[in-house]
Image (tube, rainbow, N blue to C red):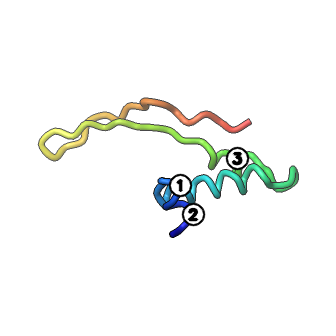
Amino acid sequence: MSGWKSAGITYVQYANICARALRNALKDEARTQQVLARNTNGLKFQKWENGVSKEQQFVRKAEAAQ
């Protein structure tokens, strides 16, 4: 059995954990704002009525990496 399966997580969660660990392990010269910005998430909500989309709203905006 795969390690991620035995840990009780999905493959996507496993891949995200690996990507985050790799970004955090980068040397300082490779650790740019563009790379660190990939480590943030945002959440949008958009309501649909009768096949027409309404205005998008941010539930949580992604914050810039420091």
How packed mark 1 is, by other alpha carbons closer than 10 Å (few <14, some 14-19, many 20 or more), is few
Residue receiving disc 2: 3
Q: Is residue 61 above or below residue 37?
A: above
Is 35 or 52 nearer to us in this picture? Answer: 35
* Residue furthest to the bottom: 1
Name the residue at 70% across, 53% down: 21
Residue 13: percent from the left, percent from the top? Answer: 51, 54
Q: Which residue is mark 3?
A: 36
What type is the residue that disc 2 sits on?
Answer: Gly
Left or right of 54 on screen, residue 57:
right
- On the image, the x and y values in percent for residue 60 come to 48, 31
Q: Whole-Å distance between the Cαs marked 2 and 1?
A: 6 Å
Q: Position of residue 19 (x, y in %)?
A: 64, 57
Mark nearer the N terminus (2 vs 3) = 2
Q: Could you give the CA–CA distance between mark 1 and mark 3, rounded to whole angstroms?
A: 26 Å
**Quadrant in which the C terminus is drawn:** top right
Q: Regarding mark 3 in the picture, which secondary structure is present there?
A: helix
Is disc 2 surrounded by few (<14), some (14 to 19) or many (20+) residues within 10 Å?
A: few
Residue lying at 51% horizontally and 59% vertically, measured from the top left: 6
Left or right of residue 37, residue 57 in this image: left
Label 3 CA crowd tier, 10 Å (few <14, some 14–19, many 20+): some
Mark 1 — residue?
7
